Image: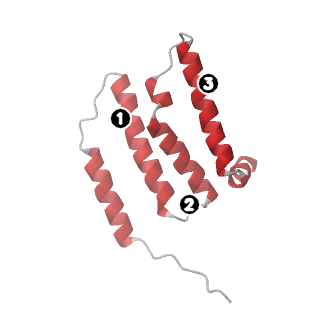
């Protein structure tokens, strides 16, 4: 897939530039009087995008991108539900922390390649 190859080859500076361009354009549109949903400019969306970017670049071989995606998704869903009038009443954050702890305990250790 051409898009995934482009993301793998993209530098971190380019990714940060894209995020800043996105935020700047959204803030400009919002300041112009057009309604922009609050969650479109939230830190949780940036966390989610960063997790996806980092995961694609590392082929999802490390747990960091999974955690970024997990937390970003949780807080983004909470923001979206708050904006539409619902409240996330379930104690999801502790459940996510427990699931992450279980994942770290039961995952197989990474096999390190021997250097010649």
Of 21 and 99, the residue lying toward us: 21
Q: Quadrant of the C terminus?
A: bottom right
Residue 26 vertical position relative to residue 104 in the rendered view, above or below: above
Q: Quadrant of residue 25?
A: top right
Residue 76 x, y percent position in the rendering: 42, 36
Q: Disc 2 or 3, which lies upstream in sequence?
A: 3
- What residue would you read off at disc 2? 60
Q: Which residue is mark 3?
A: 25
Sequence-wise, which precedes: disc 3 or disc 1?
3
Give the spatial CA distance, label 2 vs label 3.
30 Å
For marks 2 and 1, give the CA distance. 25 Å
Side of 50 where 10 appears, left or right: right
Query: Do labels 2 and 1 touch, CB within 8 Å?
Result: no
Q: Earlier in the sequence, mark 2 or mark 1?
A: 2
Q: Which residue is at a point 47% across and 49% down the rendered structure image?
A: 69
The type of colouring in the image is secondary structure
Give the alpha-carbon distance from disc 3 to disc 1, as whole Å.
24 Å
Q: Residues within 10 Å of mark 3 (few under 14, many from 20)?
A: few
Residue that mark 1 sits on: 78
Q: Is residue 55 above or below residue 31?
A: below
Residue 67 lies in quadrant: bottom left
Q: Position of residue 65 (x, y in %)?
A: 50, 55
Q: Secondary structure at mark 1?
A: helix
Q: Is residue 37 above or below residue 78?
A: above
Front disc: 2 or 3: 3
Give how far across and how far down residue 92 sits, in percent: 28, 45
Question: Height in image: 112 above or below 2?
Answer: below
């Amino acid at each position: 897939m051409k898009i995934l190859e482009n993301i793998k080859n993209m530098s971190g500076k380019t990714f940060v530039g894209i995020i800043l361009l996105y935020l700047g354009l959204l803030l400009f549109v919002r300041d112009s009087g057009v309604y922009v949903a609050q969650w479109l400019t939230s830190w949780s969306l940036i966390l989610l995008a960063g997790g996806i970017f980092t995961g694609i670049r590392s082929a999802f071989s490390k747990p960091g991108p999974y955690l970024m995606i997990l937390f970003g998704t949780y807080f983004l869903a909470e923001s979206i539900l708050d904006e539409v009038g619902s409240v996330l009443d379930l104690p999801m954050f502790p459940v996510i922390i427990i699931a992450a702890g279980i994942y770290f305990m039961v995952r197989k250790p990474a096999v390190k390649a021997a250097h010649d």
